Amino acid sequence: MKLNCDMGEAFGAWKMGLDDKIMPFVDQANIACGFHASDPLTMAKTVALAKQHNVTIGAHPAYPDLVGFGRRNMDIAPAELKALIQYQIGALKGICESQNTQVTYVKPHGALYNTMMADFTVLDTVMQAVSELDNHLILMVMAVPEAPQIKLMAEKYGIQVWFEAFSDRLYTDEGRLTPRKEAHAVHASFELIEKQVEQLCETGTLTTASGKQLAIHADTICVHGDGDHALDAVMRIRTLVDRLKLNQPNKTNAN
């Protein structure tokens, strides 16, 4: 199980997150591309930090919404949305190439991410944008019950998908994230976060808001690098995931 984190979300003199402290504990860095956060220098510094710690780099494109941090939905025509996504990924690819590294995957941000997981016509546009730019790029999407359908959509465009789950978010019975405006949408204690991560790793399930056991397959877990206790949370999740990995039976020698 990999850990991914949104990174490079500062903007000019405005600071966001604890990238320099969090980066050593994650496997994948979702680097903002300038539309919801970040700027060219922040992108360059974040790429260098990821390279220093051997962290896989992903582009984190969003709706053009700096004021709303990319969390406000926008009605954008498919052709324009495709161009916006390709523009952002292309910018990060250029910075990576200048530092002799590369973008490996794409994870949309905020409202764009939530919209594509609720409306598969938008997801189709995102997949088309990624495949046309570079079909070696992997698209990171939310681990949902419709995973087989998503895989078939990705195959149509010749791209691979990674499924992610969230360490600190409450899920609905439909396998989506509880909206942040609702009570208890974000787990407030280390104990709840660790319990959710352990359950996901050991049983492939999550407990929803109603208590239902939701079966999902996840390749990666999203952790958050902002907030007063972000570093402690990420370190605890890293320790837990590594311990669970060590405790897993060796399937190769099982027989």
Image: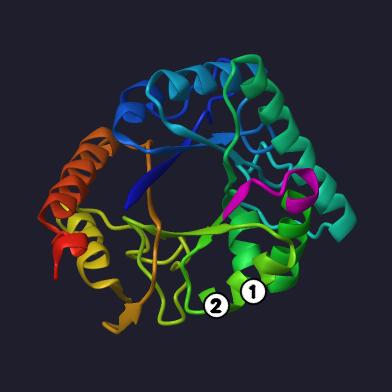
In the image, which residues are magenta?
Answer: 131-139
In the depicted structure, whether residue 131 falls above or below residue 22: below
Q: Residue at 70%, 37% (x, y): give it.
A: 89
Q: Is residue 1 left or right of residue 42?
A: left
Circles 2 and 1, Cβ within 8 Å, touching? The answer is yes
List the single residue furthest toward the left.
Answer: 247
The amino acid type found where label 1 is placed reads: Leu
In the rendered image, residue 57, in percent from the top left (x then y), is placed at 52, 34
Q: Against 110, is 56 above or below? A: above
Residue 224 or 246: which is nearer the viewer?
A: 246
Q: Which residue is denoted by mark 1 in the rendering?
A: 152
Q: Nearer the viewer, residue 72 or 136?
A: 136
What is the crowding at mark 1: few (fewer than 14 residues within 10 Å), some, or many (at least 20)? few
From the top left corner, tell me how far across and down residue 64 is, in percent.
74, 42
Q: Secondary structure at mark 1?
A: helix
Question: Of the residues shown, which amino acid type is indicated by label 2?
Answer: Pro
**Is residue 223 in view?**
no
Relative height, residue 154 to residue 214 (above, below): above
**Left or right of 177, for residue 22:** left
Question: Within the magenta stretch, is there residue 219?
Answer: no
Instruction: Please tell me how crowded label 2 is: few (under 14), some (14-19), or many (20+) other residues with Cα within 10 Å.
Output: few
Corner quadrant of residue 236: top left
Q: Is residue 55 above or below residue 74?
A: above
- The disc placed on residue 148 is 2
Which residue is at a point 68% across and 29% down the rendered structure image?
93
Q: CA distance from mark 2 to mark 1?
A: 6 Å
Q: What residue is rendered at 28% in x and 58% in y?
A: 187
* Residue at x 46% of width, y 28% of height: 16
Helix, strand or loop at label 2? It is helix
The reply to whether residue 58 is visible in this rendering is: yes
User: Which percent across, then down, holds residue 69?
Assistant: 60, 41
* Mark linked to residue 186: none
